[in-house]
Amino acid sequence: MIMKQIIFKEKYPVFTLSITKDESRFSSTDEIISYFQEKISSDPIAQYISIFDHFTHTKKLEAAGKAGEIPSDIKDAKNIIFCFGKEIPTPVVLAVRPRSIGVVEFSDRFVISFMETPHPDSTKTVENWITSVVK
């Protein structure tokens, strides 16, 4: 299990972890999302906002002929949305808030990802939450 840092689309710093279901403490996207919700709720700074069911949203677009494409091996995809905002030093900081963690489920594995936060401590916290999903 190795958390990787990549640059997505040549500009977004993203951390990603791919783990097999055998390596995970959880068996579904919903279980992982619930676990992250507990982590966020117990953090003294983080604020839980919502869960976005990206899979269902994209399926609806696909069914309506509006776009929406999901590779057939993806079984579920959700984001948990939260914020670490403890200060507003400039109006521009709101452009990088709130944050989310994405969980994508395949038949044999999960891919969990998030975009690097502006504050290194927050990035480390999210990284720790994600790696704790591993047995």
Image (cartoon, helix red, strand yellow):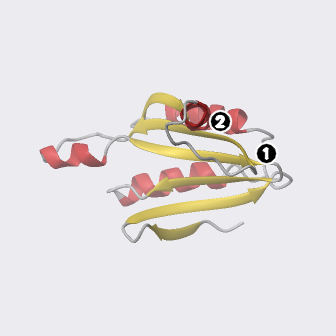
Quadrant where the image shows the N terminus: bottom right
> Which residue is label 1 attached to?
25
Query: Percent from the top left, x then y, of residue 123?
Result: 44, 56
Query: Percent from the top left, x then y, of residue 15?
Result: 52, 62
Disc count in the image? Answer: 2
Task: Compare marks 2 and 1 and give the one earlier in the sequence.
Answer: 1
Query: Percent from the top left, x then y, of residue 111?
Result: 66, 54
Relative to 18, residue 58 above or below:
above
- On residue 69, which mark appears? none
Residue placed most toward the observer, 55 or 15:
55
Which residue appears farthest toward the front when viewing the image?
65
Marks 2 and 1 close (CB-CB < 8 Å): yes
- The amino acid sitting under disc 1 is Arg
Residue placed most toward the observer, 96 or 62:
62
- The answer to whether residue 55 is left or right of residue 22 is left
Task: Count residues near mark 1 (Cα–Cα under 10 Å), then give few for <14, some for 14-19, many for 20+.
Answer: few
Which residue appears farthest toward the right when viewing the image?
22
Give the distance between the C-alpha atoms of the residues marked 2 and 1, in whole angstroms. Answer: 10 Å
- On residue 35, which mark appears? 2
